[in-house]
Amino acid sequence: MAVGSAVNVQENSAPVGWRRWNPLRCSGLELPTNLVIMVKAIAIALLLTRHFLLLPDPFLPFIPGMDLIPGAWFQRSMQVLMVGGAFALLFNVRIRLSSFLIGMSLLLSVVASKAYYGNNKTFCGLMLVLAALHQPGRSPWILRLQLAVVYFGAGLNKVLDPDWRSGIFMHNWAANRLHQPAFLALEPLLPPLVLAKLMGWFTIVTELALSVLLLLRPLYPVAIWLSILLHSGMLLFTGSTFTLFFYGMTAAMLAFVDWPSEPMTVIYDGDCGFCNNARRFFERLDLEKAFRWERSQAGGLDRFGITPAMVRERAYLVAAGRVHGGFRAFRAMLLYNPAVYLLTYIVLAVPGQRDSSFRNVLVAILLVLVSPLFTPIGEALYRVLARNRHRLAADSHCVR
Amino acid sequence: MRTVVGLAILAFQLAMIVYARFVPSRYFCWAPYDVQTEYWITTVVNGRKLTAREVQARYRRPQHGTDNRSPQHVMDILQGYEEKYGWSDHAEVTMRYRVNGKGERVWQLGAR
């Protein structure tokens, strides 16, 4: 994926007709595609976890006087803002305003009630509001700074806490609170508190490192991976999404992705039946019409540095000035498809607020499939498929 | 204008991160799940100890629970309620708590 590359982020042509309202549509709207995916993912999490049911009435507010507002009125108003805003957002109605309203419903609820206060709600509220404030034609640098501030604060708080440095916090949490099986199995094999200390310092170093990496454009890919690994790891270790944190933090990584503004080109062997079947499948997934499929037989491959012989071995994707081949091409096609993200967040959030083994397994599988470590396996599987594709489609004229 | 608002939001957070170094509370400074505070709340009003359900309704916190942040957050809720909403009850509140599984401490509010 062209992460952090110097691509001019522009909205694609605006959708018309019924396509305008398609919830899976994320391009050609008021915000850049990557930010639309981000805010929609958070909105999906809010709706499917029924977070709106948790919104409070004013109770010991941070801002004096807020508890003079009639409680039921405030609570209903925030619920209407959140749910109405989320549906408007998902159906592409006034995306910027909808994002702002959902974000404000979270932030106002946070400052209205000390009992409701939580970092995850504050973070999601801020990301929604800051996305709404995004200036067209510019990079989302304020969103990126926000992430850096979050990790800086989190890392600093921990490194200054003696219980984090000594491992006492991690031991108490993993052993006494979570009764985490892997931790309980590994801990006796090491001297007391060593495992907890290692885990604690790993968290501290990762968070502080992220606060720096997220400020350095060339290191965005590393930062994105580190952040996703950190939060996915916490999900797998604890079984918890920390209410909205998992959804918000993973979705926020999209703020660091420069989404291609031009249609991406897929070059494939037009004489291959299997390849044509694959093309039809991916075209059905391509709601945004972001991919333009070109048969290698049509010529003109020189401009991409690709030869017909190369295309007989594998398909290629040209996106944002980079050429991806084989497994990498198909993985990139999925990663550049907004619908894939939204459907993924729907599936992840469907279990609701409760812990879910299904969600844990799905996250683990996705991590493996998308990670660079899986690429050699993916390429090997692709080669097997490519060598045998003539057997997979009846009308194939594929050259073996 | 948008830039100013965004920068103001970030500046507030940085200020809270610095402020957190001088106070026991950890509001708006990005300290999620930094402390495991296990607590037990006992509230006596007019000589009667409140039930678990009454404690939950009063403070919006369970009588026995775990807060994933500084114990000060729980204390703020207890003290805030008694001073703001329940001042006429003259309640006696006792919170026993353990931070990160260490030795038990006691915090009290109200006359004994």
Image (tube, coloured by chain):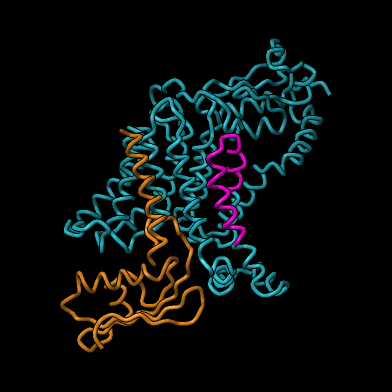
Chain colours: A cyan, B orange
The picture quadrant where one finds residue A290 is: top right
At x 60% / y 38%, what residue is drawn? A219
Tell me, yes or no, whether the highlighted magenta stretch contains residue A46.
no
The picture quadrant where one finds residue A305 is: top right
The image position of residue B100, as x and y in percent, is: 50, 73
Tell me, yes or no, whether the highlighted magenta stretch contains residue A225.
yes
At x 77% / y 38%, what residue is drawn? A381
At x 57% / y 72%, what residue is drawn? A168
On screen, A42 above or below B90?
above
The rendered magenta stretch, by its main secondary structure, is classed as helix
**Magenta span of residues:** A201-228
Q: Nearer the viewer, residue A92 or A205?
A: A205
Q: Nearer the viewer, residue A17 or B106?
A: B106
Number of numbered labels in the structure image: 0
Q: Is residue B99 left or right of residue A191?
A: left
The image position of residue A391, as x and y in percent, is: 79, 30
The picture quadrant where one finds residue A330 is: top right
Which image quarter is the C terminus of chain A in? top right
- Residue at the extreme top: A299
- Residue at the extreme right: A400
Q: Is residue A28 left or right of residue A63?
A: right
Q: Is residue A234 left or right of residue A109?
A: right
At x 45% / y 30%, what residue is drawn? A32
The image position of residue A93, as x and y in percent, is: 34, 32
On screen, A219 above or below A122?
above
The image position of residue A5, as x and y in percent, is: 58, 28
Which image quarter is the N terminus of chain A in? top right
